[in-house]
């Protein structure tokens, strides 16, 4: 290992991912239990649920564009400790946004009982796995091909 090569500790990222995965699974399970106890039955979709889904897609697109700009700033940063700090902050904010999205979807499903929210919540449960910190993806995002991991 060369001393001037950048090194990234994945343990904090993996730990934060696990916390968020547990939060998403808990929210999903709790919403199913609450729905069962309250007798909420999934029913057909309405115009209101479609409008919410469009709004959610628009907010997600906005967040994606913001995240790309943040990543560009991170890539242009030369100071390695600052770069890592910025990357970790971006990683955590993306996960927090995802958990909030699951909470909002669960709330709308419980309040409205619409199928589309249940299906979206199931999809979000699977999408959570995309956020797992993979070495090759992180090295590509940071534009550091020689990045080493602890």
Image (cartoon, helix red, strand yellow):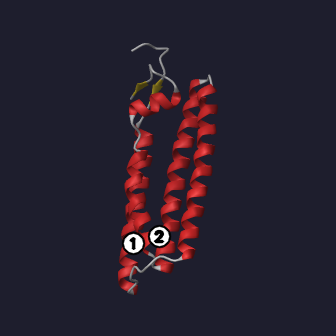
Residue under the point 50% across and 32% down: 141
Q: Which mark is residue 134?
A: none
Image coordinates of residue 31 in percent, x first then y, are 41, 73
Q: Distance from label 2 to label 1 (Cα)? A: 9 Å
Image coordinates of residue 13 in percent, x first then y, are 44, 41
Q: Is residue 71 above or below residue 108?
A: above
State the quadrant of the N terminus.
Answer: top left
Circle 1 packing at 10 Å, graded few (<14), some (14-19), many (20+), is few
86 left or right of 35 in image? right
114 left or right of 93 in image? left
Residue under the point 52% across and 46% down: 92
Q: Is residue 19 above or below residue 139?
A: below
Disc 1: which residue: 30
Image coordinates of residue 60 in percent, x first then y, are 57, 54
Q: Sequence order check: which comes first, mark 2 or mark 1?
A: 1
Nearest to viewer (mark 2 / mark 1):
2
Q: Secondary structure at mark 1?
A: helix
Disc 2: which residue: 106
């Amino acid at each position: 290992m060369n001393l001037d090569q950048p090194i990234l500790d994945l343990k904090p990222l993996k730990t934060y991912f696990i916390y968020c995965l547990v939060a998403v699974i808990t929210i999903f399970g709790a919403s199913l239990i609450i729905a069962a106890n309250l007798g909420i039955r999934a029913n057909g979709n309405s115009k209101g649920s479609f409008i919410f889904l469009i709004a959610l897609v628009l907010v997600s697109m906005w967040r994606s564009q913001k995240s790309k700009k943040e990543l560009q700033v991170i890539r242009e940063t030369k100071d390695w400790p600052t770069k890592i700090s910025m990357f970790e902050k971006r990683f955590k904010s993306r996960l927090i946004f995802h958990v909030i999205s699951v909470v909002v979807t669960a709330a709308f499903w419980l309040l409205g009982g619409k199928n589309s929210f249940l299906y979206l919540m199931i999809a979000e449960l699977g999408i959570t796995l995309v956020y797992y910190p993979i070495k090759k993806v992180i090295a590509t995002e940071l534009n550091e091909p020689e990045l080493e991991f602890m």
